Amino acid sequence: MEDVQVVGLLLRRCLTGDAAAWEDIVRRYQRRIYNICYRFAGSADDADDLTQEVFIKMYKTLNSYDVERGAFLTWVTTITRNLLVDHFRKGKHDRLTDSLDATPAQEEEGRSLGAQIEDKSTASPAEQVRSREAGEAVHEALQKLSPELREAVILRDLQDMDYKEIAGVLKVPEGTVKSRINRGRAELARLLSRTYRQVI
């Protein structure tokens, strides 16, 4: 959870030209932004470049942030998402997705990806290897999802945002968010089960 007062103070300092305050904001949000970019783009180099682009965009538009319209984290995530969508379209990788009205085959919420990843601090070396391999398999499967499903799953399961926050970022109703998450999880499960069948 972000400390609203601290972030508010940092923003005010940034707007007066305080470079140290900007560096603090970058430190606070760099990992989260990088993770979103990496999960979406699939490449560490692309994620580095995109993360830099996000911070440049943030810096240029910092004075447009309105505390009354939502949390700073939601604003940051929206900027990140919009930049990723632009990047994806420019790369001509855009794919058609299922109709948003389609009913997911399985309406279960299911466990989040985060809930499925065990705590590595107490894991044995073999368990750590399995966990790393599982993480890589999830990452590869994410790249095969349509952009709409991928971003919904990333924001919910990897960035731990709630449905209302995601709806604000994606500018769609909460019901659409839930539908995309359910369909994304179902598609991920299908892709991962196929991967593991091939390994076995």
Image: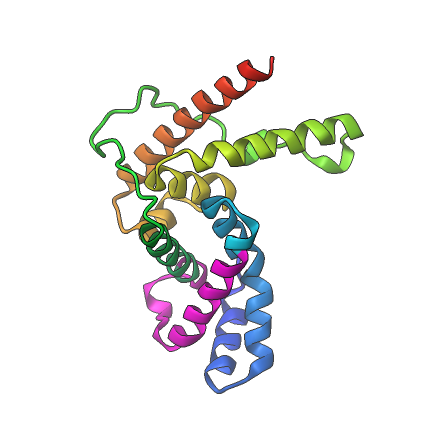
Say if residue 124 shows up in the picture. no
Left or right placement of residue 197 versus residue 167 in this view? right
Q: Name the residue located 33 percent from the left edge and 35 percent from the top edge.
A: 180
Percent across and percent down for residue 67 are 38, 69
Left or right: 178 in relation to 143: left
User: What residue is shown at x 75% (from left), y 38% (from top)?
Assistant: 121
Residue 67 highlighted magenta (yes or no): yes
Q: What colour scheme has been applied to the protein in the rendered image? A: rainbow
Q: Quadrant of residue 125?
A: top right
Above/below status of 125 relative to 59: above
97 vs 104: above or below: below
Residue 164 visible in the displayed image: yes
> What percent of the width, then of the height, locates residue 41?
46, 47
Residue found at x 73% / y 31%: 128
User: Which residue occupies the extreme front position in the image?
Assistant: 92
- Image location (x, y in percent) of residue 69: 32, 64
The image quadrant where one finds the C terminus is: top right
x and y, in percent, of residue 33 in the image:
51, 56
6 or 35, which lies in front?
35
Q: Which residues are magenta?
A: 48-74
